Amino acid sequence: MYDIENYYNAKTTDEASALLKEHPGARIISGGSDVLIKIREGKMAGTSLVCIRDIEEMKGITVKENGDIWIGAGTVFSHITRDPVIQERIPVLGEAVDQVGGPQVRNIGTIGGNICNGAVSADSVPTGFSYNAKLRIVNTGKERIVPIREFYLGPGKVKLEQGDVMTHVIIPSEEYQGYQGHYIKYSMRRAMDIATLSCSVVSKIEDDILEDVRITFGVAAPVPWRCTETEELLKGRKITKELYQELENSIRSEINPRDSWRASKAFRIQIAGEIAKRALYRTAVLAGVPEEQSFDFAEEFGEV
């Protein structure tokens, strides 16, 4: 049973903003994979909903003349995974969102909902952090661009004001061109489970030198967490076995996960170093670094 007070269907972003201001307690809904569950559980009983599913300008993926990738907030996960722009330029994002729930959820869930939900377990968010993504937010004719790293205020809390509608996720060209990425999600089940811990690594490697690296964890802190100390430690270094060991040790000292029924803090810290190491290794292989130069993960640990 869904206890919904009123349901409004917006056709434009301005209409959605106006409805949100007119009904201060209303919540945005598109796919409904998060909101409807909370309503059914009684956590948001009696809530009014503003549907943005029919706003066409918030759907699809385009590349601007300057190379920036604009992803409509209303674009569903399955579309992102299959989109040729994503597959060619930032395939790690498609791989990450392909791990959200099951096929039914991926066919209705949107990247905007995944980000605005504020959950640290969101599969799209670590890669957004690693690519220094920006969010376009509109409010009755006005717009602002917010770096995704400034958007998260705390568990389940994001920087949205009354009437705000997030319309696009922007990946600047300079943040992805020349970079390789890999996302690893650790969960208690192999499928249809939220992350116990997740890690997205994006790196730029030239002549076996790690010129730049971004390492972001989900469920390792109250908000998605960029490991900037570890990143600075690794930049400019040659890819070696010793570098991977330093990464592993540094990660474990930098993150601050919590104990929960899914996993203890100690367990999350232990696996964090391992999955970050594996993710960086995969980006190095994608960049052309010989596998035997650092670790033979396939032989030591099984498939990455």
Image (cartoon, helix red, strand yellow):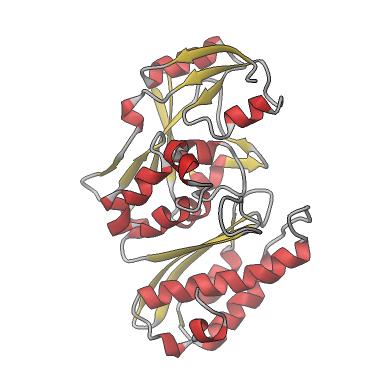
- Using the rendered image of the protein, determine whether residue 201 is visible from the camera's viewpoint: yes
Q: Quadrant of residue 139?
A: top left
When asked about the image quadrant of residue 218, the answer is: bottom right
**Tag count in the figure?**
0
Q: Tell me if residue 189 comes above or below residue 65 in the rendering.
A: below
67 relative to 168 in the view: left or right: left
Does residue 185 lie above or below 211 as drawn?
A: above
Q: Nearer the viewer, residue 25 or 163?
A: 25
Counting from the top left corner in percent of width and height, residue 47 is at 63, 17
Residue located 64% across and 48% down the image: 223
Q: Residue visible at 36% across and 46% down?
A: 80
| On screen, residue 19 above or below 173 | above
Along the line of sight, the residue nearer the viewer: 129 or 33: 33
| Horizontal and vertical percent position of residue 48 | 58, 15
* Residue 146 visible at all: no
Q: Residue at x 31, y 47 (%)?
A: 69
The N terminus, quarter of image: top right
Instruction: Kindly identify the residue that appears in the image at 42 percent across and 44 percent down.
Output: 77
Vertical comparison of 185 with 69: above or below: below
Residue 193 vs residue 145, the one in the foreground: 193
Q: Is residue 223 shown left or right of residue 83?
A: right
Q: Position of residue 89 (x, y in %)?
A: 30, 57
Residue 183 pos. (x, y %): 49, 62
- Residue sitting at the far left: 65
